[in-house]
């Protein structure tokens, strides 16, 4: 796997995970989602999670890999909690769980920062 391919997968993941906040807001507003809670909870149901699992042997040589895997897992767990609240019509609680300063925001920020750092590291080596 080339450095360019890793960077491209990181970029896709950053964009994809950025979309989840919008999906959650939509679920909160409509009390519906195309995704069920059990599916959302599993980290390797998304393309990034599948990639992390599939190429674990290559990717695990990077020091930040385990941190990214854990943050990604944590983000899926928190997203599932919020999705469950949204689908249960607990809009106020769900909205608070995605607000600035929330656990979701913190995990999401840490994951993005870790992925951006990984990209910088890869570019410096390339």
Image: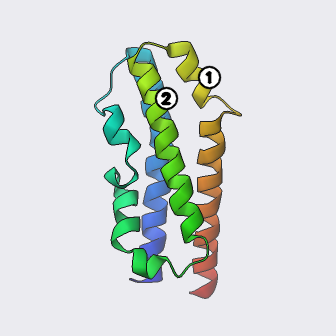
- Which image quadrant is residue 70 in? bottom right
- Residue to which mark 1 is pinned: 96
Residue beneath the point at 60% across and 87% down = 125
Please rate how many residues cluster around mark 1, counting C-alpha atoms within 10 Å: few if below 14, some from 14 to 19, many from 20. Answer: some
Please rate how many residues cluster around mark 2, counting C-alpha atoms within 10 Å: few if below 14, some from 14 to 19, many from 20. Answer: many
In the depicted structure, whether residue 27 falls above or below residue 100: above
In the depicted structure, whether residue 124 falls above or below residue 91: below
The x, y position of residue 111, in whole percent, is 59, 54
96 with respect to 25 (left or right):
right
* Towards the viewer: 78 or 109: 78
- What number is the disc on residue 82? 2
113 with respect to 2 (left or right):
right
The x, y position of residue 16, in whole percent, is 43, 49
* Towards the viewer: 62 or 14: 62
Pick the quarter of the image with the C terminus.
Answer: bottom right
119 with respect to 81 (left or right):
right
Residue beneath the point at 44% across and 68% down = 8
Pick the quarter of the image with the N terminus.
Answer: bottom left
Residue beneath the point at 47% across and 81% down = 3
């Amino acid at each position: 796997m080339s450095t360019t391919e890793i960077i491209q997968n990181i970029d896709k993941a950053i964009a994809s995970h950025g979309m989840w906040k919008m999906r959650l807001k939509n679920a909160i507003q409509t009390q519906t989602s195309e995704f069920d809670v059990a599916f959302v909870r599993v980290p390797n149901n998304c393309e990034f999670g599948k990639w992390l699992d599939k190429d674990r042997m290559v990717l695990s040589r990077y020091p930040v890999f385990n941190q990214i895997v854990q943050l990604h897992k944590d983000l899926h767990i928190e997203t599932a909690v919020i999705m469950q609240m949204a689908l249960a019509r607990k809009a106020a609680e769900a909205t608070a769980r995605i607000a600035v300063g929330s656990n979701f925001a913190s995990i999401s920020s840490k994951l993005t920062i870790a992925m951006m750092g990984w990209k910088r590291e890869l570019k410096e080596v390339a």
